[in-house]
Amino acid sequence: MVPTAWMVAFFVSSMLVVVLLSFGHTQADGQPVFGTTPANFAALWDPVYLELFLRSLGYALATVVLSVVVAYPVAYAIALHGGRYKNALIAAIVVPFFASYLIRMYAWKALLSDEGLVNSGLRKTGLSDGIAFLNTPWAVVGGLVYGFVVFMILPVYASLERMDVSLIEAGKDLYHGPLRTFVTVTIPATRAGLYGGMLLVFLPALGDFVSAQLLGGPRTYMIGNLIQQQFAEGQNWPLGSAMTVAMMAALTVLMIVYLRATTTRTREQS
Amino acid sequence: MSARRLERKPFLAVAVTVAFFAWLYLPIVAVALFSFNSAKSLSVFSGFSTRWYSDFFSNSALLESLSASLRIATVAALGSLVLGTMLALGLERITSRPARAVGAVTLMPLVTPEIVTGVAALLLFTGVGLKLSLSTVTLAEITFSIAYVTVIVRGRLGSMSPEVEEAARDLGCTPWQALRLVTLPALFPALLGSGLLVFALVFDDFVLAFFTTGVDPQPLPVRIYSSIRFGISPAINAVGTLMLLVSGLLIVAALLLPRLFNRKTSSLDLITGGERR
Amino acid sequence: MTGAVPSATRRSLLKGGLAAGAVAGFAGCGYVPSKTKPTESPLPKSAKSRVDGDLVYFNWADYLDPGVLKGFQEEYGVKVIESNFDSMEGMYAKINAGNQYDITFPIAKWVAKMRREGKLRAIDKDQLSNAEQVYYSGSYFNDPWYDAKSAVSVPFTVYKTGVGWRTDKIDAMTGSWNDLWNEQGAGHIFTLDDQDEALAMAALLLGYDVNTAKASELDEIKKLLISQKKYLRGYSSDDVNNMSGGDAWIHHMWSGDFLYVREALAKKKTDYDFEAPKEGTPINSDAYAIPANAKHPGTAMLFIDWLLRPENAVKNIQYLYYPFPVKDAVAAFNDLAKDVPDADLDVKDLENPDVFRLLPADQVQARAAVWTEVKAS
């Protein structure tokens, strides 16, 4: 099969190059070369990097949680109450996603600045004296959610669409409360979409560098920024490659644990 | 078909949805608004002017960048659609462990940070002696977009029953005919959906594109990204608004296309790749 | 479904695996350690100034007045094909990868580096009709530190780094880099997101050389920069929008960007001021250079000559707010900077020792490690 050969050739070999480079070093003239030294990996064994990784994990997880909180009501309202306008509403969600991610994030920076539109509005309506939105962890997470929530809404919506609505009716009769119905009926019934969405939001959020670069503060550095710096200013491609290999190894472990956990539950449920 | 309407409109869900759309569109409205700003500021609107648009249309470099981006995205979408679907079909038939390993490998692009894939692709192309150009960008983009197509198509294949294809074969179709007349049409929503998704992702990609472009006109997002560190000019807002319009028109076209082919499949599936009961 | 792997898939996996190995093997050829020697071979000869094709232009985004570019296209009937980079490292990587640009704009120390590696071709001053605008007798650029006898480059802009601040938000500044630790401005202070600039700022405050790579000095620099974090709002090179958007009350800033904010964007000019700290200010410059593998170097020579025309230099000065060392255009810059003497620059300032020099890779990495730790902690 052609595509398998293609994928293996291009993708695998480019990843191989990264792995080989992670064991290399930079020559005196600045040229990165392959090698067999584990020095780059040893350099990663620093509490600063560990803290950075945990922080990135935290931001990515917060992004996932917030995405779920936003996605479910929206998908629910459209799927079950959208009527004739369902398609248009979904299209209305997807269209902005096509406009440049960079421009939209930059627009947030302009909007949320201390003398920008949002703060001017708050001052004029007397609601507040002005809030310093930017350069905080919440600004970074907000940016991440803004960029990736679509990846949660669509799978959840698809699952809700396929779900038998009478289940909800039955649930309401049984459980006497919308929240309990939601938790015990709706979420399990849509778990395929939920799990897919969680993965599609978590992974890119973890490796993102744009949000922290544009909206972040002095203590919001993420893995994506770190790796990017090694390939740019730091001029240390081998170290950057080692960081990537380490990050992907950690993610693979997490993914295996995650897939095991979600498949087992599926088997139990059926 | 069960009744899809419930008795009461859930107030909370609707309220959240309205708030969500407002939040989603706020920067877009701001970008569009300020693209008509007569001054160079991004915070104060000084007056209506179309100078940024006339700058854009008279700036052949930006126009060429836009055209380059459109071309790359189209070819990449088609290429990854073909390859990704073949891969998905192949993987679906096989359940052995080597195949599952290949299946896992196809997910790796989703996990890898773009700067790494960019540098890796650059090292690969230059190491092999391939000259960088828009073709190398397209090649790289296809390789790293196949994963999206494969995941979505496999999801759709998973909910399709293989009996239909088997029935077609029993009735005398060759495997190729069965594929063409039965499977592919049934996959149409997933194909359209993943094709559009790849188009959007590639059209907006900047990191991978930067590392793999040659001296041809650079894709538009590379141009945008190279100024983002030091602050972008409002001319970029005009660019953003135009990109939005172009993609908005594409989506509208995609929504209407199924109706043109007189399909019962609802157009909403184009993105979710699923099927409504 | 059978459990056996169909031979088609097995074959293609095998083919793919072989292909991967072969490709990686070839790619490896480019990255095998080798003994590097600085090229002793003579510089690639200069081209003659004449049209020999379209100009393949590689520069920062928005760095030249679009009108000047358009004028060049009209005057000589050629097209300008523009590519942008957002960092010197990115520029270098693309040139190293074999892309053939006709003209690029390296910063001083990168001119030195690329010249040493034989990547730039000579620029014969006699081919430039406006050469004496820059290379008048006694000019610093006749023999700048980064390019002996100015063989491969023509100076583009000069700039210095200082501190921009809001006079309506901050009562008093001390004229020292310590102002970036100002109590009143806490939470509204920005440092440039630039390794060389940030390390230089701390080095100057401690009395060290801006290019230092000594372990003990770097350690002190690191501690100093980390101590700034509780006052800092962020690391950002978007000084123009941070200042004009009101998020920054004190900003580690480039002189040209400050002038742009004050003269072009500010609602009230007197709200903004700039200081060149007494411990020293880094001075930097960039230049035009023609890569050795350029396909249309003749057109590139014409382009440089075009940019050296005083009327075009004036246009660029009024677009960028940075000084261009073009003799007959200097007055235009002095006019822009007249209210803010600290942001004014003289070409002689380049003789200042606080310039960013080319360093060997291990020193760069030592400095990079410090910067990484500062940003990550």
Image (cartoon, coloured by chain):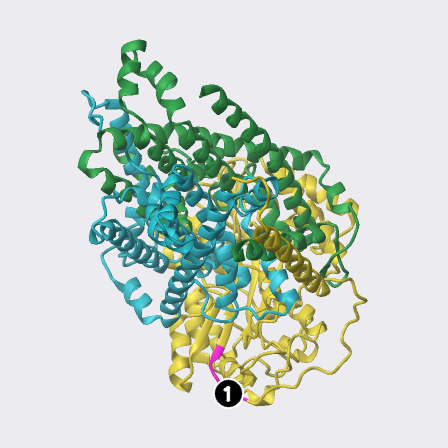
Chain colours: A green, B cyan, C yellow
Front residue (pair B227, C222): B227
Queried whether the magenta region covers residue B35, the answer comes back as no
Q: Chain of mark 1?
A: C
Q: Residue B144, how many percent across, how many down?
A: 51, 53
Quarter of the image with the C terminus of chain C is top right
The residue that appears at 48% across and 79% down in the rendered structure is C55
The residue that appears at 52% across and 36% down in the rendered structure is C186
- Side of C332 relative to B22 (left or right): right
Which residue is denoted by mark 1 in the rendering?
C52
Q: Residue B258, how many percent across, how many down?
A: 24, 50
Count neighbours of disc 1 (C-alpha within 10 A) and say few if under 14, some if 14 to 19, many if 20 or more: some
Q: Quadrant of residue B47?
A: bottom left
The residue that appears at 66% across and 37% down in the rendered structure is A49
Q: Residue B90, how many percent across, how many down?
A: 50, 48
Front residue (pair A270, C139): A270
- Side of C372 relative to C245 (left or right): right
Q: Residue B60, how many percent across, how many down?
A: 36, 72
Residue A157 at least partly seen: yes
Establish if A11 lies above or below A162: below
In this picture, which residue range is highlighted in magenta? Answer: C49-55
Residue C179 at least partly seen: no
Which element carries disc 1, helix, strand or loop? Answer: loop
Front residue (pair C286, C354): C286
- Most prominent secondary structure in the magenta stretch? loop
Establish if C158 lies above or below A141: below
